[in-house]
Image (tube, rainbow, N blue to C red):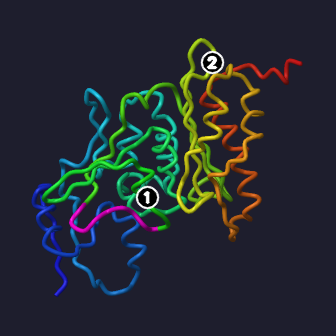
Amino acid sequence: MIRYAKPTTVDDALALLGEGQWRILAGGTDFYPAQGSKPFRDNILDINGLVALRGIAEAENHWLVGARTTWTDLVRHPLPAAFDALKQAAREVGSVQIQNVASIAGNLCNASPAADGVPALLVLDAEVELRSAVATRHLPLAEFILGNRRTALQPGEMVTAIRIPKPATAGSSVFVKLGARRYLVISIAMAAARLAVEDGMVRNAAVAVGSCSVVARRLAGVEAALRGRPVGHALATAIQSEPMDELSPIGDVRGSAEYRLDAAREIVARAVLGAMGAVPDERAAA
């Protein structure tokens, strides 16, 4: 017989997970479309009663985003400028109605290559908090999402939070998404960039691209090329010369692999220039 449970404490939820196989229901924005009209065959663990998992808090060494925090919660919460890319990505997650109920952790657990929140979280060095009835562990986001619809979740575990280390909240960030239309679209390519600028120089850079490989990727070569350079539109030239070997785009109905790679270069440049802030265009002045 199929079981349905809606616990009100995290401990109760973890105890149930430790007893057997459950399919976790959070916002439901991926859950119900995937289910369609098929009959339910799995036990359903509804975590929408876990109030403790919703909200954003600042600790001494990190920011903590509860697993049930919605994209609307994130947009409305006052956060440092380094979170701007994540807020911009939040506004791209489906419609406003979806943003009001979809959870951030659900976006990660769905593990889609086109998940809007992942590149923006990668440039924040996000970690995923995984809890079971017997242990708690933390994984870098890049180690949590293993492939298309595959994560590192182990039996009996659930995502309880996303942690953002304080050192990764320096600077400002921008998210850029390319799709076939402006709203309600799966991306062809997307990029997030975070720059920390000091005395007119790029002190640190974090750049990630989604929809151009089986999982979203940080671009180590681009980041290294940006560090130590003076801010200005010449940064775009430095990006264009990087091979971006981390990416392995596919061709599909939304675009060819070649188009995706060209698009990635362009939107990475736009994201970097946006994160750099308003700088006069030397080319226009020449």
The N terminus, quarter of image: bottom left
Residue at mark 2 to residue at mark 1: CA–CA distance: 33 Å
User: In the drawing, what numbered circle is on residue 145?
Assistant: 1
Identify residue type, mark 2: Met
Instruction: Tell me where residue 235 appears, x and y as whole percent.
Output: 72, 29
> Left or right of 257: which side holds 85?
left
Identify the element where label 2 is drawn.
Answer: strand
User: In the drawing, what numbered circle is on residue 201?
Assistant: 2
Residue for point 89% across, 19% down: 286
Judged by its main secondary structure, the magenta piece is loop
Identify the element where label 1 is drawn.
Answer: strand
Identify residue type, mark 1: Ile
> Left or right of 149: which side holds 155?
left
Answer with the quarter of the image where residue 64 lies: top left
- Residue 155 among magenta residues: yes
128 up-or-down from 273: above or below = below
- Residue 22 among magenta residues: no
Q: How many marks?
A: 2
86 up-or-down from 275: above or below = below
Residue for point 28% across, 55% down: 159
Residue for point 17% across, 67% down: 17
161 or 68: nearer the viewer: 161
